[in-house]
Image: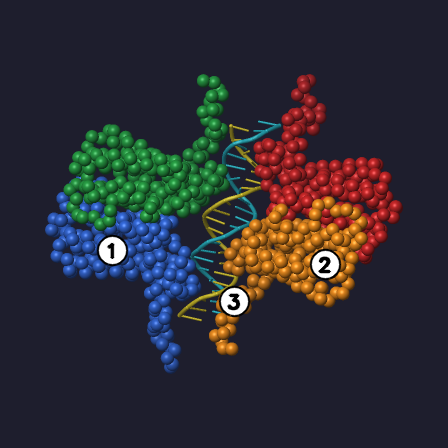
Chain colours: A orange, B red, C green, D blue, E yellow, F cyan
Amino acid sequence: MTATDAKAVRPQHRLRADAVRNRERIVTAAREAMVVYGPEVAFEEIARRAGVGNATLYRHFADRSELIHHITLSVMTRIADQAETVLAEEPDAFQALRRFAHAAVEERVGALCPLLTDEVSFDHPELRDARERLERAVAALMDAAHAGGRLRPDVAVGDLMVALSQLTRPLPGSGCADFDRFVHRHLQLFLDGLQAPARSELPGAAVTLQDLKHHA
Amino acid sequence: MTATDAKAVRPQHRLRADAVRNRERIVTAAREAMVVYGPEVAFEEIARRAGVGNATLYRHFADRSELIHHITLSVMTRIADQAETVLAEEPDAFQALRRFAHAAVEERVGALCPLLTDEVSFDHPELRDARERLERAVAALMDAAHAGGRLRPDVAVGDLMVALSQLTRPLPGSGCADFDRFVHRHLQLFLDGLQAPARSELPGAAVTLQDLKHHA
Amino acid sequence: MTATDAKAVRPQHRLRADAVRNRERIVTAAREAMVVYGPEVAFEEIARRAGVGNATLYRHFADRSELIHHITLSVMTRIADQAETVLAEEPDAFQALRRFAHAAVEERVGALCPLLTDEVSFDHPELRDARERLERAVAALMDAAHAGGRLRPDVAVGDLMVALSQLTRPLPGSGCADFDRFVHRHLQLFLDGLQAPARSELPGAAVTLQDLKHHA
Amino acid sequence: MTATDAKAVRPQHRLRADAVRNRERIVTAAREAMVVYGPEVAFEEIARRAGVGNATLYRHFADRSELIHHITLSVMTRIADQAETVLAEEPDAFQALRRFAHAAVEERVGALCPLLTDEVSFDHPELRDARERLERAVAALMDAAHAGGRLRPDVAVGDLMVALSQLTRPLPGSGCADFDRFVHRHLQLFLDGLQAPARSELPGAAVTLQDLKHHA
DNA sequence: AATGAATGAGGGTTCATTCAT
DNA sequence: AATGAATGAACCCTCATTCAT
């Protein structure tokens, strides 16, 4: 392989080291800020958290929807990774679901809420692929738990993902840390409710991630 | 002394009938609007829903926090009513909890979330009283369920109220009325998780409503 | 005529007196500012000239293109009025053209330049009507001058209107007043060039106002 | 002493060949861009047209006014060249004026308009010299035409230069290259108006280029 | 010397709040 | 009491200019 080949492999020119660092800080800051304030969070807030000027956000992301796109993509990918890891490692099917759910909280699954509201991003191929991969991975976890009779049969991927997002969204204005003490606790209660045998009849119907958009 | 002197006698003079009607319409409109759009909803949207001019809001409420104060008060009062009604009517202690929780959703308990973040309102005597009444009522429900061995022993009022608020909070940035279709479903799952016997060990500790503020 | 009829005649509710005054000041200020700085002039500059806050512009005009629409319409109407008046009053056909041209300068014909660049406004029926009326009036003036053999035959409405706009646009940053001393002088020279008999052959072709858009 | 010490000896050291090329490309690109978009054109647009990075503009020109300075200088020099060439070549004195005027349009005389508004540049010795040379050359053309009785006696250099600039100024906010089709046509009409005998009496007074500043 | 990256300042636009009718 | 109108402050985004590679 020649030096020229290296370029061919990475057609986008190499970012400067400081730019790479800034980009990462922006994505992290944006993920945290969006979890706390929602997708309408002020860019200034994100910039402040990232320690950069606000115009720097625009150098890296043409507009808000592009930033949301990247964050959503990044979080979905990381959560899908978690799901696949847990699936491979954890022999107990329901325990695997638990581990996945708690890991997803740590990965800021709450940042996925724009997924449900942002029209544009939803149809992007890259995001669709990530969503499908995530859904497959979580479905595999749930299928295993269903198969083992550990998970009540009347729930599906959408139930877990939506409730997970809702339960983990921090209150605006509060520091994340303080709120976190409830998250794992209430998530655990919710997971207990998911366990078979079902203790009640559920209203409504189980939904997939794909369905979410059609109704939102 | 003329009729108009009534003001002097009762500093809180009787509002004109239309003013009373407006005030009620504003509180109702604001509660609905905040549930749909979040606590940052535009005043103009509230005014539009209430069918009044924007400046009329300011005649009734000095600012947003005062409006939130009244909404919170109203919601807490109505939820406490529900708790007391259910307590009196429902012989099955856990079923009573379920009925209360679902009723609270209908009363838009999600609108209470600003309560947890707004410093000023929290310490207001009127609100404190309502909060204490609500807590007593819900505690009575939970105590009964605990006593009957139907509710797992490691949960308290704060767990129910916080999770209830979280599950019913609207997605920020969305007018996502459709979201309601998940709420009762996921609430039911959560309630199943609350039922005794406990299916897992919970991290953290049970909290009361009073505690919420000290940590938030 | 009854009181009810008055409403029927003016379905749009009556503006408050101060709002009417502000609206007029804004239109005037915007016309002057656009003549000087072009249609991209800062709203802040217009607001400053009108003596109002910048948000007031948005109460009266939803966006820049609506403001441009009104100014263009207003200027075209006033210039068409001038053309018709001169046509009725001035027996000397070429002198009529001169009087019209100098009057159009005073009415800030330079404000029409957005007409040539703004896509949206151009197709609006109201503007199209005003443009056609203006063109008819100026065409009548030119036809009369052509008929009397006073105007060279190789020029048309577009030539006069475009050159008029160009010659009267003040230099940005300069006070209007200082520049005005050239305007009538150079306009006079241009009008002399329009007189028959033609002293040279013209490149290009005569154009109407309608044509302007197709090429711009 | 090494070769690198050349800088010390000649503070205006020789530019590298690529730097010279870049400088020329920038001036050309800036002239064209300013003619099309006006003097407020984005530096990024100029850099893009010149095929260099944005920061390179600042290596060659400290700020916008310095860039304008050089463009103005360049345009004035080229126009003066044209005037002198025409004077030497064209025996018909009025035809010489016509040729000069149309040539000046091609040299983008409209780019000179910032000259009239930019305080700083106007008094720069280099520019003053160029302006005086231009004025002498155009005055010579006009004197010859006056002497031959071909040019009306009540006009001077300032009339020609100002009208020339006005007629060739681009419409603000438009990349209106199409506008060129009017320029030679209307310039021709204006030149016809300059021809002797005068067909009207002019308001105001003839001015020189020097005068422009005192009034602007 | 060249340039990608960063940023503060400025203009556009919205909205909570105040003012005047 | 009610409300249309006004506005300053906040946020979005762009761009001239500076910085670091």
SS at circle 2: helix
Residue with the mark numbered 3: A15
Which of the two residues, B177 or D60, is positioned nearer the viewer here?
A: B177
Which of the two residues, A115 or C41, is positioned nearer the viewer here?
A: A115
Residue A143 is labelled as 2
Q: Which residue occupies 56% across, 54% down?
A: A123
Between discs 3 and 2, the one toward the N terminus: 3
Q: Residue C208, percent across and down? A: 28, 42
Q: Which residue occupies 61% across, 44% down?
A: B175
SS at circle 1: helix
Q: Can see residue B158?
A: no
Asked if residue B39 is positioned above or below residue A87 in the image, the reply reads above
Q: Residue furthest bottom?
A: D1
Say yes or no: labels 1 and 2 on the same chain: no
Asked if residue D27 is positioned above or below residue E9 in the image, the reply reads below
Mark 3–mark 2 Cα distance, whole angstroms, equals 42 Å
Q: Which residue occupies 69% across, 18% down?
A: B1
On-image quarter of the N terminus of chain C:
top left
Q: Residue D8, percent across and down? A: 37, 75
Say yes or no: labels 1 and 3 on the same chain: no
Q: Amino acid at mark 2?
A: Asp
Mark 1 and mark 3 in contact? Answer it, CB < 8 Å.
no
Q: Which residue occupies 33% across, 57% down?
A: D32
Q: Amino acid at mark 3?
A: Leu
How many other residues sit within 10 Å of disc 3, few (<14), some (14-19) or many (≥20)? Answer: few
Q: Residue B196, percent across and down? A: 84, 51
Mark 1–mark 2 Cα distance, whole angstroms, equals 80 Å
Which chain is disc 2 placed on? A
Residue D104 is labelled as 1
SS at circle 3: loop
